Image (cartoon, grey):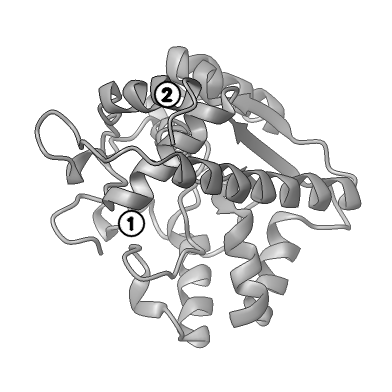
Amino acid sequence: MLDGIETGYKEKFDFPQRADPPRLLYMLASVPRSGSTFLSHVLWRSGCLGAPLEYLNFLPGSPYHAAHGAPKRQVALWRSALQRRTSPNGVFGAKCFSAQLRDLQQANPALLIAVMAALLPTDRPAFVVRLKRRDPIAHAISYARAALSGVWHKMQEAPGGADVQFSAKAVDHARRLLDQQEADWDLLFAEMGIEPLVLWHEDVIAQPAQATQAVADFLAVTLDPAAAVDVPEIERQADSDSRRWAALYAAGQR
């Protein structure tokens, strides 16, 4: 687990362990710095839409970092997630970045095959919720600042937020990376004939309850207020320095 950070991957946040496979699975597809952690916790809090976290992230520094380079352990964690993170109504969700699937293709193809069969089946409807951001510059700035500072979560921030030296080069690099990852999703879903439900980061932040209802309607799941669960709060990071970066980038500063 991440040192000093309360994550949603701890056992105390599990749903009751399930013996049967989930009756309905969906993918929350996004790219880094799209607000996907906020959305995943909003959906999870309903108690009816699974707990769509990053069960395929084994990189150093991630909650599942201990399984990095250990394919059998990764498979075991995935199977465990299916049992522990399926809400009592039988719904399971997993948050995925396209880069994570690329990593699995190289490092653990057997797990990728299992994941694709579960989340993006070809013999039954596949359900994908895709989260995007409307402002590509703000998105790239968010990614660039996090990459340079190493601060990816609110709980890692110093009081007042992180001041990072402006770098237009870092923003340009972030734009290329994010564009490529979005293009990967475009290509995959087009090839598979999948039409995701598209949500926008800005709308989710403004109206989280409406986002939850939209996902429930898309999945044909009935929300039960009595099923709601307590999950870790996700606080937004300070954005004053981001606004400074945006002004400098717009002015052509390098």
Report x, y in % for residue 191: 90, 52
Binning the other alpha carbons within 10 Å of mark 1 as few (below 14), some (14 to 19) or many (20 upward) gives some
- The residue labelled by disc 1 is 9
Report x, y in % for residue 120: 76, 55
Identified at 67% across, 23% down, the residue is 217
Give 166 or 140, whichever is nearer the viewer.
166
Q: In which quarter of the image is residue 162?
A: top left
Q: Is mark 1 on a helix, strand or loop?
A: loop
Q: Quadrant of residue 214?
A: top right
Badge 1 amino acid: Tyr
Give 179 or 44, whichever is nearer the viewer.
179
Q: In which quarter of the image is the N terminus?
A: bottom left
Give 209 or 162, whichever is nearer the viewer.
162
Can you see residue 229? yes
Earlier in the chain: of badge 2 and badge 1, it is 1
Badge 2 amino acid: Ala
Q: Is residue 55 above or below residue 91?
A: below
Report x, y in % for residue 60: 35, 71
Q: What element carries label 2?
A: helix
- The residue labelled by disc 2 is 246
Q: Is residue 96 left or right of residue 168?
A: right
Q: How many marks?
A: 2
Report x, y in % for residue 245: 37, 28
Identified at 53% across, 16% down, the residue is 203
Give 222 or 117, whichever is nearer the viewer.
117
Viewer-nearest of discs 2 and 1: 2
How far is the residue under mark 2 from the one under mark 1?
Answer: 34 Å
Identified at 38% across, 54% down, the residue is 16
Binning the other alpha carbons within 10 Å of mark 2 as few (below 14), some (14 to 19) or many (20 upward) gives some
Picture disc at residue 58: none
